[in-house]
Amino acid sequence: MNPVGIHFGYWTQYWEVEPLPFVEKAQKCGFDILEVRAQKIARMSAAERDTLKGAAADAGLGLTYSIGMTADMDMLSEDAAVRKNAIDFLRQVCMAMKQMGGTIMAGINYSSWPRRPLPGEDKQVLTDRAVEGVREAIKAAEDCGVFFCIEVVNRFEHFLMNTAAEGIAFVERVGSPNCKVHLDTFHLNIEEDSIGGAIREAGSWLGHFHLGEPNRRPPGRGRMPWAEIFDALRDINYQGALVMEPFLVPGGEVGRDIAVYRYLPGHDKLDEEAARSVEFVRAEQKKAQAR
Ligand SMILES: [Mn+2]
């Protein structure tokens, strides 16, 4: 059975908050993993990282790390200094993760996020730049035992890779054993002809997986084809984490960036909804194993 996790942003409206309080929340709700913000971990002191690492170990909780860089750190930029900012920062993230014993760096680790093409920008030119940048930054990841899991997202959040096929082609070009594909049901639901087909296509390239309903309610509260998804994950023998990313509360930076513009059902009982969703995910996995 895959470990089940939750992104810390479920409980907050601000990206740079202290991750420590969410360790206890995730544990109490029954999760195996808490996904934290890689940038925040990189900016913490070594002592703060040790405290977080100890708390997670005490709670029996694994940590995964996701990233969405700001526009001043962008490997797609025409400006070499902005590209260098991104590579330097990703190296810092790798070092911080090594101290934490972390291995999964997921999300938009190849550009800033959210991002649309600027006037005159060419997707092919920018893809080449991203491949070059990731190839450079991933050397630090290889040294630190960190995996770059390249998240494929929908067209409204980024333009470089919207399908599993585009993600696989990118990772193949990077050509590092530490480069993997990261898929997310929320995005697959928008872009793919077949969600199960996309997962099977990713196969052994898949390094990280996000779970979400079409409207970002916790898994089990929407109309995502979970049987198809868990059957496909079983078929490719995916052993990695399943991290849910529900968002029910509008406002702040998180509400703005995730585009949550209303209170969704369950917003007034977040812990209860999350705990229910962990049970749902585990039950769906079991059903797939038995089919
Ligand atoms: Mn995601």
Image (cartoon, rainbow, N blue to C red):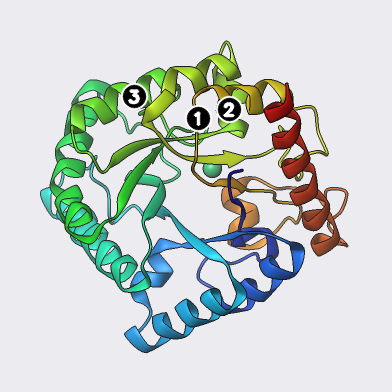
Residue at 38% x, 79% y is 44
Q: How crowded is mark 1: few (under 14 residues within 10 Å), some or many (20 or more)?
A: few
Pick whichever, 127 or 82, lies toward us: 127
The N terminus is located in which quarter?
top right
Pick whichever, 206 or 128, lies toward us: 206
Residue at 17% x, 58% y is 143
Quarter location, residue 114: top left
Residue extending furthest toward the bottom: 47
Residue extending furthest toward the front: 290
Distance of label 3 from label 2 (alpha carbons)? 19 Å
Residue type at mark 1 is Asn
Instruction: Please tell me whether residue 203 is drawn above or below residue 90 in the rendered image.
Output: above
Instruction: Please tell me whether residue 239 is drawn above or below residue 3 in the rendered image.
Output: above
Tag 3 residue: 168
Task: For the residues labelled 3 and 2, say whether their Cβ atoms are less than 8 Å apart.
Answer: no
Residue 257 place in picture, x, y as percent: 56, 50
Quarter location, residue 23: bottom right
Q: Ligand 1 near label 1 (Cβ, under 8 Å)?
A: no
Residue type at mark 2 is Arg
Q: Residues within 10 Å of mark 3 (few under 14, many from 20)?
A: many
Residue type at mark 3 is Ile
Tag 1 residue: 237
Distance of label 2 from label 1 (alpha carbons)? 5 Å
Residue at 49% x, 24% y is 236
Tag 2 residue: 234
